[in-house]
């Protein structure tokens, strides 16, 4: 299972778009807004490797810290009810006593990706896809709407095995997916 977190800002990523000839598209947005929705997610691959599951949780106006990561991990353990192999980046919040305390002995094995290797983390590709596809050119004016659209986009990704498998394949890690 891969774990990672990201943040979605109120200002959209602007990409090339279409409009009628002679009419420049205009994206109206709130200026100087530093509001955001932080997300934590896990890609889960069962031993049979027949399907990939995406779990995520959003936090409005909050950073993902060790306590939020622990809460997500505990919820995931209750949901899956099986020993886990966790693979995540070497961020400081992923290491230390709080994380080790939330994992009961035998319930999880931790592995860390090398530092400064986001290309090995398939969830980095999920965040990039969300920001550059469903959420691009989408100026939202309130935090609730940003959270709602982010949730909707992530839920649609949950049902796309081809997309989730593509994120894993793009890492180059040999996981022998079927």
Image (cartoon, grey):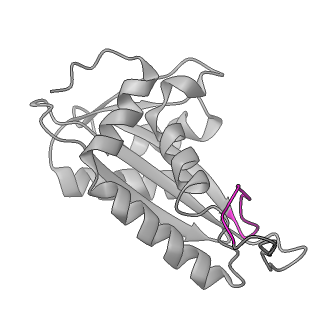
> In the image, residue 45 lies at what x, y percent?
23, 36
Q: Position of residue 87 (x, y in %)?
A: 40, 29
Along the horizontal axis of the image, is 119 left or right of 122? right
The answer to whether residue 28 is above or below residue 16 is: below
Q: Can residue 166 be seen in this view?
A: yes
31 and 38: which is toward the camera: 31
Could one spot residue 64 in this view of the protein? no
Q: Quadrant of residue 140?
A: bottom right
Horizontal arrangement in the rendering, residue 114 relative to residue 48 (left or right): right
Residue found at x 84% / y 74%:
33
**What is the span of residues highlighted in magenta in the rendered image?**
9-19
* Quadrant, the N terminus: top left
Q: Nearer the viewer, residue 83 or 5?
A: 5
Q: Position of residue 143 (x, y in %)?
A: 66, 80
Q: Which residue is drawn at 15% across and 27% down?
A: 178
Residue 58 on the magenta span: no
Reply yes or no: does residue 13 show up in magenta.
Answer: yes
Residue shown at the point (77%, 72%) measured from the top left: 25
**Can you give x and y, in whole percent of width and height, for residue 74 in the image?**
34, 54
């Amino acid at each position: 299972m891969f774990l990672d977190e990201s943040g979605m800002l109120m200002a959209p990523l602007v990409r090339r778009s279409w409009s009628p000839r002679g009419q420049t598209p205009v994206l109206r947005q709130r200026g100087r807004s530093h509001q955001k929705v932080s997300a934590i997610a896990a890609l889960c691959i069962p031993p049979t490797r027949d399907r990939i599951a995406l779990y995520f949780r959003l936090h409005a106006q909050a950073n993902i810290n060790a306590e939020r990561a622990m809460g997500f991990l505990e919820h995931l353990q209750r949901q899956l009810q099986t020993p886990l192999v966790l693979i995540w980046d070497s961020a400081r919040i992923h290491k230390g006593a709080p994380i080790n305390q939330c994992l009961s002995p035998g319930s999880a094995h931790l592995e860390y990706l090398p530092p400064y290797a986001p290309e090995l983390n398939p969830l980095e590709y999920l965040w990039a896809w969300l920001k550059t596809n469903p959420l691009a050119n989408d100026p939202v004016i309130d935090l609730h709407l940003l959270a709602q659209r982010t949730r909707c986009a992530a839920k649609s990704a949950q049902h796309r095995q081809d997309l989730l498998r593509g994120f894993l394949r793009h890492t180059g890690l040999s996981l022998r997916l079927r």
